[in-house]
Amino acid sequence: MLSIIVPVDVNLNTYYKESLANFQNRSDVEIILVHQEEAFTRADRLNIGFHRSNGGMILFHHPRSLLTNDAIEFLIHESEKKENSFFWGGFTHKFDRKHILLQWISWYSNVIRIRWKGIVYLDHCIFFSREMWTSDLTIQYLFEDTELSKKFKKIRKPILLPYVSLTSSHRFLKHGIVSQMVMNFLLKIGYKLRLPSSLLFAIYQK
């Protein structure tokens, strides 16, 4: 079974609904939605979702990302293989708007961050074999996907699948692409300096 876990938050773009439309009533898929009413941080929602799941393959589906039927079918097929223990990674990132800077961000995320550094962000829609989960995510307000990747890449390198994870560019378009890029860069510096994640999240929200 494939367990699809969505840490739902309040958003204008809820692409996950379109991703899951054709998988609602299948015996080889379970869909688990964990809302903000149950847990405020995304890390907490992912922890809750994992412990509710039963599948041998887990998919953390970003609420603002869209996966094709073929991408999810591939994971269903992989979940049936007993030899696929310690299998994890993400899908190829792409924004839903065309802009040279957005294309550069996706390229960096796919090539540098995943293939070189072994870090998979949630908007790639992270998948992994159940055996790889050894302990709950530390409660971070931001960068919980980085913390998860650090754990997993100690076991093996992530796989970047060619299926596209089409992600909303709403935040970049709303705040300005350059401004959002600068903000994201500053947040990463704050993370590396081990500033409180609650502080970083407050800055991110503003």
Image (tube, grey):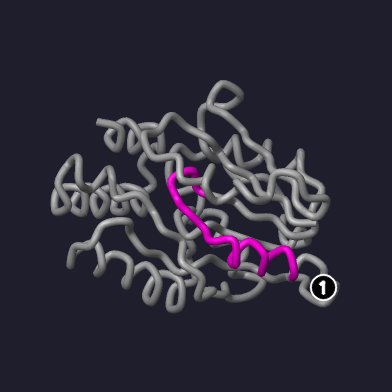
Q: Is residue 153 left or right of residue 130?
A: left
Q: Nearer the viewer, residue 69 or 105?
A: 69
Q: Disc 1 marks which amino acid? A: Lys
The magenta segment: 62-77
Q: Position of residue 57 (x, y in %)?
A: 74, 60
Residue sitting at x 27%, y 50%: 184
Q: Quadrant of residue 80?
A: bottom right
Q: Position of residue 131 (x, y in %)?
A: 78, 61
Q: Quadrant of residue 70?
A: bottom right
Hey, which residue is sitting farthest top in the picture?
37
Q: Is residue 167 left or right of residue 139?
A: left
Q: Nearer the viewer, residue 38 or 143?
A: 38
Q: Position of residue 147 (x, y in %)?
A: 53, 54
Depicted 78 relative to depicted 134: above or below? below
Q: Which residue is mark 1?
A: 81
Asked if the stretch drawn in magenta spans residue 64, the answer is yes
